[in-house]
Image (spheres, rainbow, N blue to C red):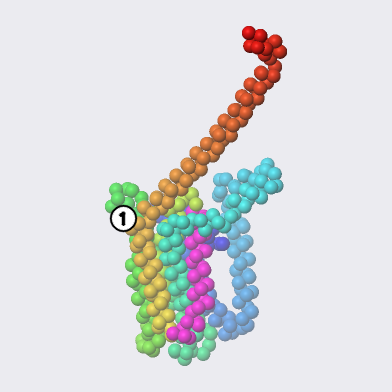
Amino acid sequence: MGWFLSGTLVGAISFQELSSCWTSVFNTNVHPGPAFGPFIGGIIVTFTSWRVIFWLQSGLAGIAVVGAFFLLPETIHYLKSEELEGLPLRQKLHVLWEMTNPCRVIKLFRYPNLLTVSVASSCLVWNMYSLLTPIRYVLNPRFNLVSPIQSGLFYLSPGFGYILGTFFGGRWADRTVKKWLKIRNGERVSEDRLRSCVPFLGIVIPACMLIYGWSVEQRVGGIPLPVIVMFMQGVAQLFCFPSLNTYCLDVMQAQSGEVIAGNYMVRYLFAALGTATVLPAIEAIGVGWFSTISAGFLALGALMVVANVRWGRAARERIDRKRRAARAERGNEQVATRMEKDDHHNAGKEKADVDDTIVGEPEGEKNDGDMV
């Protein structure tokens, strides 16, 4: 929830030309966590009880809550809760359900550009968690390590890569946007931002994963080689996340909250899947082949991003036209239905007036024709 809200806030308060840079600054505090957390946990487990880890997490959560309450002022101009004022309870519940209905997030995947970007983000998160999760089980026997703190040191390599990447990944994405603004004579196309992540997602990270997996599998390169490639893939990942995250904020600004919520939903489903399957898969096929599968998954994500750059704008505009046409058709049907009801009502009223007129005529007038 915190990542989703923070990403949405970054998109709301920053300029579009610099939004990737600010997203990258936010990532400075987020992505190093999965790498430095196990290192700190290794120190705690080595010298004290594992239960201390949960006390530390509780304390950090408490600091975050207090800091958010006292240090983050409210900047919203309009509270959605104002829409509930004065409504009866049943109508309040109906409006509240419309505000919080999760189908609003899922329905957005009718846009293929949002689905492809979610899969590309999922490739990165799959790679991150399937790389970090089995470090102790893969590298400890490979290098004859015996203590948690020794294996925890390997987490520092991708962690420092994430930190270094945050200083340059966002700037690289914003530079790409400005470059294509000039090429298009000032026309802004949201998909141009995605161009910045393609070489890293499709080449650098898959190459690092292949080198890492097969060097460990074949026992070559010693400790330096896996450390170097883990660092490089960490840097490359943070050249991808700013452009992918910011694209979610830019492409549909009126629904940026729902878009980024759907993206995080998909990516962390894949994170959970990678975490759950990595150890059984490595035991079954080895770290080399599993890294090859991850590299192929990353290459697939890069191809989907390329397809999004090429056809994403046309696809979303086509769906927008269909939705507008459907809304107009529904509106016309509603107008026609109302007009038909009015016609029936007016016809019934006219008939009633005629009947009243006939009933109200004098008896002599009714029989004038007969007398003639």
Which residue corresponds to the image point at 50% horizontal and 63% vertical from the top-left?
264
Amino acid bearing label 1: Lys
What residue did someone put label 1 on? 179
Q: List x then y, in percent, for residue 65.
A: 62, 62
Task: Tell me: residue 216, above or below residue 333.
Answer: below
Q: Could you tell me if residue 337 is visible in this image? A: yes
Give the magenta part as a residue range: 256-285
Number of numbered discs overlaid on the protein picture: 1
Which residue corresponds to the image point at 31% horizontal and 54% vertical from the top-left?
180
Q: Quadrant of the C terminus?
A: top right
Which residue corresponds to the image point at 52% horizontal and 68% vertical from the top-left?
269
Between 267 and 324, which is closer to the camera in this rendering? Answer: 324
Q: Could you tell me if residue 201 is visible in this image? A: no
Is 204 placed left or right of 339 in the picture?
A: left
Q: List x then y, in percent, for residue 53.
A: 60, 77
Task: Tell me: residue 266, above or below residue 320.
Answer: below
Which residue corresponds to the image point at 47% horizontal and 58% vertical from the top-left?
109
Between 372 and 121, which is closer to the camera in this rendering? Answer: 372
Is 227 placed left or right of 41 in the picture?
A: left
